[in-house]
Amino acid sequence: MSATVVEIVKASYLKTKPNDETLGFGRTFTDHMLVMDYSVATGWTHPRITPYEPITLDPAAVIFHYGQTAFEGMKAYRTDDNRILLFRPEKNFQRLNASCERLSMPAVDEAEVLEYLKQLLIVEQDWVPSSPGTSLYIRPFIIATEAFLGLAASKEYKLVVILSPVGSYYQNGIQPISIKVEEHYTRAARGGTGAAKTAGNYCATFNAQTKAAQEGYSQVLWLDANEKKYVEEVGSSNVFFKINGEVITPELNGSILPGITRLSVIEMLRSWGIPVVERKVSIEEIFRYDDEGLLEEVFGTGTAAVISPIGELEWQGRKLHINDHQIGEVTQKLYDTLTGIQTGKVTDPYNWTVEVK
Ligand SMILES: *Cc1c(COP(=O)(O)O)cnc(C)c1O
């Protein structure tokens, strides 16, 4: 028998759902959430669906002081025949556990939490939007709740899953973005927490992101923290370069977040017979390939935008214009195939989608 939540407490009133046209990202939340508690003595207990509501914590809770927390980001999509699909959800819970391990937090039972999530999605099924490009964003997270100021891992935690209907990332069709190579700040160092989805990795990028936005760029490209030489990621996306027919992406080195979209893109390219390599790649090398006329396409990958074509890259005062600011052929095919699989419009030869029912 599959795992079930022990309790469902229905919200006493239901919110008015926003129009699909007005959906942005991450500001509207559904009526219910999933909650589960952990203590060293009992393990994870009392999985329950409750009304969406504030969490009350002791001011000394470890999360507030030492940032012991991990999160995930995934989506549920509505198909044309009104089914609800998840995309490789088991990978998100595997990665949540990998993040927990790095942060001295307890692992969850991946299969069990996926079952609880499906139950939450069934309660909230009317919140999964149907317009093209929309989806229900799923944010699982774990926080350290023990009231203790000593520098040690918390003995108590809370897992919460909240849901947010999100709009089409590309309001005016898919548009190549401009990126600035960040030369002062770095995102993550080798041996640090860069491979984990944990709060501190993100608040530390806000200043560079704000500065780049003021200069007219959508995101920054992060270089490695040791030498400021090798490409790591773009914003909170993984990055790919198509050079002379071959696709290159930075190899996972402990400071790069192992994206599930990244993994899926690598697997799709392999199945199409397009050569793809994971290796160290320096920013200087990318600019040299462009000088030689060999840089064909650049794109970012992540759950939010799925595939983001990059049309411009700025580094040390030099500007690269990629593929004439047009989306490349492989980038477009990846976008169409991946979003097609996620929304059930294209057959899924990889068995990546999981139906919620
Ligand atoms: C979440 C995230 C990604 C993309 O991962 P997906 O699983 O593809 O959504 C890439 N980089 C960073 C820093 C991230 O936080």
Image (spheres, rainbow, N blue to C red):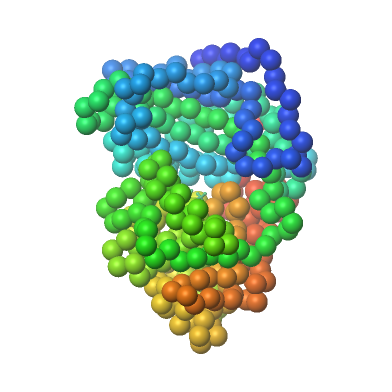
Q: Where is residue 145, by image quadrant? A: top left
Quadrant in which the C terminus appears:
top right
Q: Is residue 271 above or below residue 126?
A: below
Q: Where is residue 253, by image quadrant? A: bottom left
Residue 264, visible in the rendered structure: no
Residue 142, visible in the rendered structure: yes
Q: Residue at x 37, y 58 (%)?
A: 185
Q: Position of residue 150 (x, y in %)?
A: 21, 27
Towards the viewer: 356 or 226: 226
Q: Residue furthest front?
A: 214
Q: Residue at x 70, y 19 (%)?
A: 14
Q: Position of residue 56 (x, y in %)?
A: 44, 18
Towards the viewer: 252 or 295: 295
Q: Position of residue 34 (x, y in %)?
A: 53, 24
Q: Residue at x 54, y 53 (%)?
A: 302
Q: Residue at x 43, y 74 (%)?
A: 316
Q: Position of residue 87 (x, y in %)?
A: 58, 45
Q: Is residue 167 above or below residue 254?
A: above
Q: Residue furthest bottom?
A: 292
Q: Is residue 171 above or below residue 243?
A: above
Taking the image as shown, residue 86 lies to the left or right of residue 145, namely right
* Total count of labels: 0
Q: Is residue 288 above or below residue 8?
A: below
